[in-house]
Image: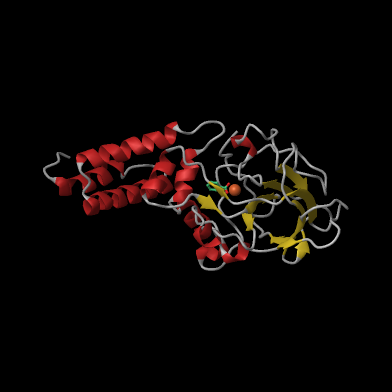
Amino acid sequence: MIIDKAADVTPAVLAAMAATPDPRLREVTAALVRHLHAFVREVRPTEQEWEYGVEFLGRVGQANTATHNEGVLFSDALGVSTLVCLLNNGDDGATETAAALLGPFWRDNSPRTPDGGSLVRSPTPGPRLFARCTVLSGGAPVADARVDVWHSSPTGMYENQDAAQAEMNLRGQFVTDAEGRFRFVSVKPAGYPVPTDGPTGDLLRAQRRHPFRPAHLHFLIHKPGYRTLITQVFVDDDEHLGSDVVFGVTRALVGGFRRGEGAAPDGGAGEWWSLDYTFHLEPGEARLPVPPIA
Ligand code: BEZ
Ligand code: FE
């Protein structure tokens, strides 16, 4: 089709893609073109602005490395990751869900750690945390589930961002026991700023947004026969619960951290915290995500 005017472009592109054999790809790409063209009609970017936008997306891709995933970060900061998560969980988004976004820091190969073992693999100052968790489905324990736990240090850095931490510090993989339980020892996580040295950081600054996430632990619970649960549990009193830069806080995920009184479970001195938490799995397809970093 020869284009005469702006109004001809959208139908020409849709017609060119109409014979895409894969029906889902056909549906997704047609919707993308319709919405993208509608966006351009609404915003009417100048040629200079469009050049900037395309160059910005290029910078997002170029910032990806084995230890940093700017693409995931960008999707998270726009709220798209949380929207996709909530629409795919909790009765197609209609009800509360215990799922949360994966984020850019999950690694697929964290060390297998015995029940009750520690995630602390290099000196990591901070209040000790004793976590006792249970995995249930329909009220019954889920035994032999794989549970990945990862979190930032009390200085707000993941080990892959921080040369001062040992490889795999504050990461571990557990297997639930016959009662669906797993326990671990760590340090209390702190809130932290997401990485702001790339294009996503440029956008946050331009929008006058702060870059903080409230303190949390990440969990990925995986067992064939159950939908893989990817979630986060947030520290109850964090100042950024209501303004998480990546919109990951839902009410279901706040709570369970308690400041310890008296002797710590390990008999050690100093401030300590406990976390008691129960996860609920739904029957379904178990699927591991593509690791955002190596
Ligand atoms: C995280 O919680 O690890 C995270 C999530 C989104 C963006 C950056 C970090
Ligand atoms: Fe995190």
Q: Residue at x 51, y 68 (%)?
A: 94
Q: Quadrant of the C terminus?
A: top right
Viewer-closest of 79 and 194: 194
The colour scheme used to paint the residues is secondary structure
Could you tell me residue 167's position as x and y percent?
69, 33
Could you tell me residue 231's position as x and y percent?
62, 54
> From the viewer's perspective, is residue 92 above or below residue 155?
below
Left or right: 196 as drawn, with respect to 291: left
For the question of whether residue 146 can be seen, the reply is: yes
Viewer-closest of 234 and 287: 234
Left or right: 158 as drawn, with respect to 262: left
Viewer-closest of 119 and 264: 264
Where is residue 139, by image quadrant? bottom right
Q: Residue at x 62, y 63 (%)?
A: 237
Q: Quadrant of the N terminus?
A: top left
Residue at the left extreme of this rendering: 4
Q: How many marks?
A: 0
For the question of whether residue 229 can be seen, the reply is: no
Residue at the right extreme of this rendering: 267
Could you tell me residue 149's position as x and y percent?
69, 47
Q: Residue at x 63, y 51 (%)?
A: 190
Could you tell me residue 3's position as x and y percent?
14, 41
Left or right: 99 as drawn, with respect to 247: right
Q: Residue at x 77, y 64 (%)?
A: 140
Left or right: 48 as drawn, with respect to 143: left
Where is residue 259, by image quadrant? bottom right
Residue at the bottom extreme of this rendering: 95
